[in-house]
Amino acid sequence: MKAPQQLVLDMGLANGPTLDNYLPGPNAQALDHLRLWLGQGSAARSPLPMYVWGESGCGKTHLLRGVRAALEQAGQGVGWLDAKSTDSVAFDANWAAVLMDDVHAFSSAQQHAAFNWFVNAQTHQMAVLATGSLPPADLKLRDDLRSRLGWGHVFALQALDEAQRRTVLRQQASARGIDLSDEVLEFMLTRFSRDLGSLMELLDLMDGYALQTRRAITIPLIKSMMDNV
């Protein structure tokens, strides 16, 4: 069986993360900060770094990709580095920001690149926005990088509770024109991973499979989908 993320890419139906489709729940302060930062305009944006941390599924990567989408939509480039990055990219002074995802998992080579980008970003008064699973002081990274990640604004994200996850799923389903029944919602929450990222990928899969088979989203459809992937 293919991994859920691969299936989403195969169907080509995954909706990219944006700040508009992020439900903050208890994390409104971090979202508000990012909206304010983006709204200041390229000439006035604060160069202070921002670090967001929390457990898997709390929306860290969603927020970071949402910022990237907003900047790219405005015609501004960004430097992007995550734990899966393999190519060495030189710092570009024309970037609007440096974005680093899952820094807790950076290899030695990635930490070297991240530190280089960080120093250059500071020289050019450019903000660095980063995410990780731990607070800055607890990161198992080189000292100079770890200390810089904690220099600016630090936000701890909390995972949404079950009621909030249900709200997100219903809102996202409604945006796709899907009437998500209580039975289907309960099936999703009891038979699959309960973290929001996985649930959103599952919703994308269900939507794509329903369109392909021209069937309504029901439990039998979900079971058929999983049997045929």
Image: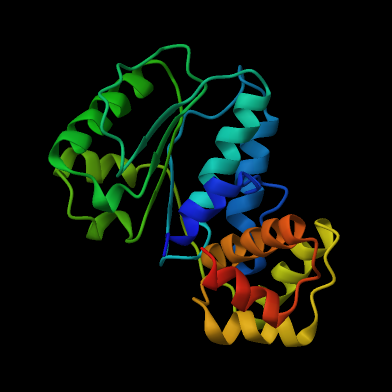
**Coloring scheme used:** rainbow
Q: Is 110 placed left or right of 209 in the picture?
A: left
Q: Which residue is drawn at 58% across and 19% down?
A: 76
Up/down of 66 relative to 229, above or below: above
* Foreground residue among 188 and 221: 221
- The answer to whether residue 60 is seen in the rendering is no
- Where is residue 157 shown, x and y percent of the image? 50, 63
- Where is residue 44 shown, x and y percent of the image? 61, 22
Q: Which residue is drawn at 48% across and 25% down?
A: 78
Q: Is 33 placed left or right of 51 in the picture?
A: right
- Where is residue 169 shown, x and y percent of the image? 71, 69
- The answer to whether residue 200 is seen in the rendering is yes
* Foreground residue among 36 and 165: 165
Rendered image quadrant of residue 120: top left
Q: Residue at x 64, y 18 (%)?
A: 75
Up/down of 68 relative to 53, above or below: above
Rendered image quadrant of residue 166: bottom right
Q: Which residue is drawn at 23% across and 45% down?
A: 106
Q: How many marks?
A: 0
Rendered image quadrant of residue 65: top right
* Foreground residue among 158 and 66: 66
Q: Which quadrant: the N terminus?
A: bottom left
- Where is residue 147 shown, x and y percent of the image? 24, 44
Up/down of 61 relative to 42, above or below: below
Q: Is 75 placed left or right of 140 in the picture?
A: right
